[in-house]
Amino acid sequence: MTTQQPQPSNDAPAGATGVALPDAKIGREAFGLVLLSFGVLGGLGALSALHWAAGLSAGLTGLCAGGVVVRRNSNRRWQQDAGSMVAFTAYAGQTALLFYLLPPLGWLAVSFLVLAAGLWLSSIEGA
């Protein structure tokens, strides 16, 4: 003997079957982005309370990483360009901050950029 599963009636509200509606997914993602933003803001605020350079450095590092991720995961040219510009601007700001705090750290950041460019150029497969 088989048991029949109850069928939802036409009177049931949309989504009562346990299937998430597109509107519910969008709302969930929007709420998640709001929580993510407040979490990042709280972390940067806590670091800035310790020292202004710590909060600024963390923010610039996050912007640089975000720009690289956008650059690598985008299909449209303008999105890739925007990601590159954000990453470059954040890295330049980080380098300027390091030069302000301690010049050898600034030179270390410049050396790291030159090293990364050398690795990138040497790893491109031949034509």
Image (cartoon, rainbow, N blue to C red):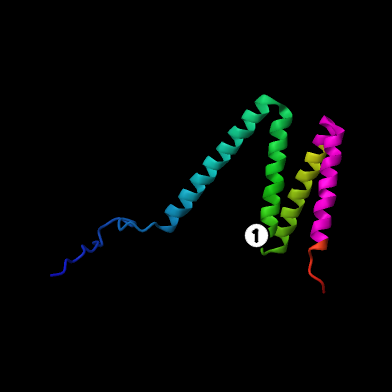
Q: Position of residue 84 (x, y in %)?
A: 75, 54
Dot 1: few (<14), some (14–19), or many (≥20) neighbours within 10 Å? few
Image: 99 above or below 26: above
Q: Is residue 65 a member of the stretch shown in magenta?
A: no
Going by the image, does 29 lie left or right of 17? right
Say which quarter of the image contains residue 6: bottom left
Q: Position of residue 91 (x, y in %)?
A: 78, 45
Going by the image, does 110 lie left or right of 59? right
Query: Which residue is denoted by mark 1 in the rendering?
Result: 73
Q: Is residue 106 a member of the stretch shown in magenta?
A: yes
- Is residue 115 or residue 86 the one in the foreground? 115
The C terminus appears in which quarter of the rendering?
A: bottom right
Q: Secondary structure at mark 1?
A: helix
Image: 21 above or below 91: below
Q: Position of residue 105 (x, y in %)?
A: 82, 36
Image: 123 above or below 46: below
The N terminus appears in which quarter of the rendering?
A: bottom left
Say which quarter of the image contains residue 72: bottom right
| Range drawn in magenta | 97-121
Query: Residue at (70%, 51%) from the top-left corner?
Result: 67
Query: Residue at (72%, 59%) from the top-left corner?
Result: 80
Q: Majority secondary structure of the magenta segment?
A: helix
Say which quarter of the image contains residue 79: bottom right
Q: What type is the residue that disc 1 sits on?
A: Asn
- Is residue 94 or residue 11 the one in the foreground? 94
